[in-house]
Amino acid sequence: MKTNRLTLGALTLLLAAGTSLAQTRDPLRQTVEQAVNTNPEVTARFNAYRASVDAVDVARAAYLPRVDLNASVARDYDRFTGRLPEEGQTLTRRQVGLNLTQLLWDGLGTSNDVARYGHDRLARYFELIDATEQTALEAARAHFDVQRYRRLVQLAEDNYVQHRSAYLQIQSRFKAGVGRGVDLEQAGARVALAESNLTTEVANLHDVTQRYQRIVGSAPPKDLPTIAMLKAGLPASPAEAMTLAVRQSAAVSASIEALRAARALADGRRSAFQPRVEARVRGAAGRNVDSLLDQTRNATAEIVLNWNLYNGGADMARVRQQANLLSQATDLRDKTCRDVRQTASIAYNDTRKLVDQLVYLERNTLAIEKARDAYRQQFDIGQRSLLDLLNAENEVYTARRAYANAEHDLGLAYARAHAAMDQLGRTLGISRTSNVADDASGWDQSDDAPTRCPAIVAELANVVDRSELDARAQKMAAGVPPMPRPVDATAPVRKP
C-alpha cells in the first residue's frame, strides 16, 4: 500500500478538467468547486485521512530496530553479609549505554497491525471521497434552492401586483358609486393574503441564501441562469442505477474497508497467545559500570523470549469482543449498502416521475391562465363575479408555483441520482486528481461485497392504471353508478 503524503491542494477532489479559463464557467459547477475547496467537513475528512497515513507508518516502525541511549550518574552502597567481618562498599558510578532491540517474532501481531491500519487508511480515503460527493450534492441543492426561491419571490410579487391592481379597480368603482363595499373588502382580503405569501417567500429566500453561504462559503451570485438539468450519464433502468450505486459508492467501499480492518484486528488479538522473541544488543562505558569496581566497559548480546501464560482471561475476552465487533462491521456494511440502494432508487424514480409531472403541470398552468384571462374579460362586462376572478388569480399563482417547484425538484433529482452513483463531479465536468485515484488503484470488493443487500427492484402494488381510471370516468359521465371497490381481506376490520 502506498503511504504517499499529499497536500490539501493535491488532494482536492474536484478540479476543473477540459475547459479553458477564458470560457464562461457554469455557475453550478463553480458553486460545487468552491464548496468542496472550502467546506470544513471536507477538510476535516482530509485531515483524518492524513492521520491514517501516519498511523500506517507508526505500525510499520515495529519491523525496524529500536535504539535507546541512556546515561546515568549514581552512588551505590552494597553490604556483604557473608563475609567476616561484615563490610560495606560504596561506589560512585558513571556510565553511558546504548541498547538495540530487534523484534523477531510476536505472533504476527505487527503484521496484522500494519494490515489493519492500511485498511483503516483506505476507509478514511473513501470517507473523504464520500464527504466530497455529499458536499457537492449539498452545494447543488443550495444552488437550486436559491434559484427556486428567487423564482417563487418573483411569482409572489406578480401575484401581489395582480391582486393589488384588482383592488384598485374595485376601489375606483366603489368611490364612483358603481361598486359594492363587500367586493372592496373581499379584494382587500386577497391583497393581504398575497402580501403574506410574498413575505413568506422572501423569508424562505433569506433562509436558503444563508444555507448557501454556510455550505459554499460565500453569498450566491446576483445573477443565476436557468436550471442545469444533468440528464447525461444516467442508466437506462432503476436496476442498473442501483447496481452502479453499490459498485461505485464510496460509502459502501468505506464500510468494506472498515470490515477488513476489524478482521485484521481480530486476527491480531490472537498474537497474545504466542511468545514474543526479541534480539537485544547492549553496550555501556564509564566508571564502575553496572556497580562493579573498576569496570569501564560492558557489552551484552542476547535472545529474549517472553511468553505470557496467564492474564486473567483478558486475552480470550478480547478475542470474543473483536469477533462481535467483526459481526457488527458486517452488519454496518450491509446496512450501508441498503441505504445506498434506497437513495439511488428513490432519486432515479424521481427523475422519471418529475419529467411526467412537468408535462401535466405545464398543461394545467396554460389552461388556468387562459381561463383567468377569459374570467377577467367576463368580469369587465359583468358576466363574472369578483370572487370568480380572484379565485382564478389564486389558481394561476398556485399552478405557476407548483410548476416552478417541480422544475427545480427535477434538476435536484438529477443531481441526487448522480451523487447516489458517486458520479456527480464527473457529470459536472470535473474530475479527481491522479494522486488521489492512485491511492485506491486496483481496489475491488472481492469476497467482502455486501451479502444482505438485494438488487431486486420492488414492484409496486396497486399501481395507477390510467386506462382503467378513464374507463370508470367515462361510465360515470354516462350516468352508470360506480362499482364498489374490492375490500382488502388483509386489512384490519374497523369496529363501529
Image (cartoon, helix red, strand yellow):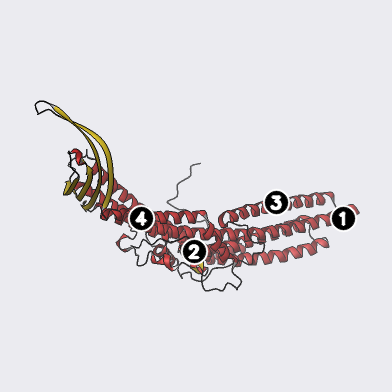
Counting residues from the start of the chain, the first of labels 4 and 2 encountered is 4
Q: Nearer the viewer, mark 3 or mark 4?
A: 4
Q: Nearer the viewer, mark 3 or mark 1?
A: 3
Question: Which amino acid is tagged 4?
Answer: Asp
Report the residue marked by disc 4. 120
Disc 4, SS: helix
Report the residue marked by disc 2. 417
Report the residue marked by disc 3. 199
Question: Which amino acid is tagged 2?
Answer: Ala
Residue 435 sits in quarter: bottom left
Vertical relation: 476 (above or below) 197:
below
Disc 3, SS: helix
Counting residues from the start of the chain, the first of labels 1 and 2 encountered is 1
Q: Residue at horizontal 54%, vertical 63%?
A: 33
The image position of residue 345, as x and y in percent, is: 46, 61
Q: Nearer the viewer, mark 1 or mark 2?
A: 2
Question: Which amino acid is tagged 1?
Answer: Ser
Counting residues from the start of the chain, the first of labels 4 and 1 encountered is 4
The image position of residue 173, as x and y in percent, is: 87, 55
- Can residue 80 be seen in this snapshot? yes
Q: Residue at horizontal 31%, vertical 50%?
A: 327
Q: CA distance from mark 1 to mark 2?
A: 54 Å
Viewer-nearest residue: 466 or 190: 190
Vertical relation: 477 (above or below) 55:
below
Would you say 126 lies left or right of 212 here? left
Counting residues from the start of the chain, the first of labels 2 and 3 encountered is 3
- Can residue 348 be seen in this snapshot? no
Residue 246 sits in quarter: bottom left
Disc 1, SS: helix
Report the residue marked by disc 1. 172
Question: Which amino acid is tagged 3?
Answer: Thr
